[in-house]
Amino acid sequence: MHILSIPMWVGSSNNYAYLVSDDETKDAVIIDPANPPEVLPVLEDKSKSLNLTAIINTHHHWDHAGGNKKILAAYPNLLVIAGKDSEAVSTTPSHGSTFSIGKNIQVTALHTPCHTQDSICWYMEDKATDDRVVFTGDTLFIGGCGKFFEGNGTEMNKALNEILAALPDDTKVFPGHEYTKSNVKFLKTIDGENEAVQRLDKFANENKETQGKFTIGQEKAHNAFMRTSSDEMKKVTGKSEPHEVMAVLREMKNAS
Ligand SMILES: [Zn+2]
């Protein structure tokens, strides 16, 4: 599969849209094309060589799903595959259900309610190249997680540490925002001795973009929100149950 990152609102909200295509058939989907002025020129250029079939959203927030109608105005035949609250949604795959992009990419919908109740992470496997990736929206960031706008620590703990943690460790993570620098700054205050945090810090200092550069296995090592069962995070939060550790970590990050 080929993944083209389209940075949007760089320097303010630092969102990413992603254009994902099957190498063999050139069938493609656009994920979270929230800012049409930055996305449409790319689609215009790439649609000459690709067959764009759908918009996919990770959740309904305007900086992810707010461009759907304008994209549809230019490409009226696209499906909108998203949670129930997304603009112009046409279908919402159930948790664990699958569909294909072209011949080789199998997509699995992973419902991860918390940041919003309609948050869905999209796990994609390329059967031809054996690549595995997950588009996590505002549920999982590199070194962090989204705010609990519509959920609680129990839900985010399930999302990160049961659902996403069950993916193969070599699955590459493509989040909805470039927040790594701010996330690693927080990680250093609570888990600075962790060598994986130090490696993430070095990478974030040397690279403006971190999407797709880290895997689920690496997140389990450096991301405090995926370490809610660890002795270190229990000690930092003063809690013993993973969902309580999650809730306290989120409060600490909000206050940082
Ligand atoms: Zn959001």
Image (tube, rainbow, N blue to C red):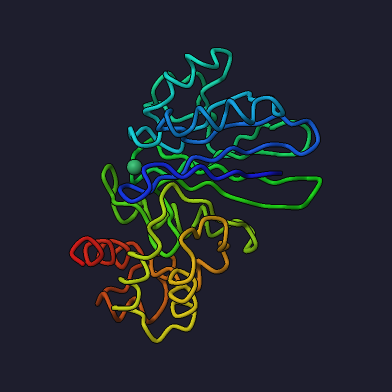
Judged left or right of residue 111, residue 51 is right
Q: Quadrant of the C terminus?
A: bottom left
User: Is residue 8 or residue 158 the one in the foreground?
Assistant: 8
Which quadrant is the N terminus positioned in? top right
**Toward which corner of the image does residue 167 lie, by quadrant?**
bottom right
Estimate the x, y position of residue 214 in percent, counting from the top left: 55, 63
* Position above or below: 130 against 200: above
Q: Residue, x 51% and y 42% (percent of image)? A: 6
Q: Is residue 91 or residue 66 the one in the foreground?
A: 66
Task: Tally the marks.
Answer: 0
**Which residue in the rendered view is the most extreme toward the bottom?**
193
Residue 64: where, in percent of width, then height?
Answer: 40, 36
Residue 40: x and y, percent?
50, 27
Residue 72 screen position, x and y as percent: 49, 17
Residue at the spot x=63%, y=44% of the render? 3
| Camera-side residue of 137 and 19 | 19
Q: Residue at x 40, y 45 (%)?
A: 15
Residue visible at 37% across and 70% down in the picture: 184
Can you tell me which quadrant of the image ligand 1 is in? Answer: top left
**In the depicted view, which residue is nearer to us: 47 or 248?**
47
Residue 131's place in the image compared with 6, above or below, is below
Q: Quadrant of residue 140?
A: bottom left
Which residue is situated farthest in the left direction here?
A: 255
Question: Measured along the vertical axis of the image, is residue 232 above or below residue 6?
Answer: below
Give the answer, above or below, for where 220 lies relative to 199: above
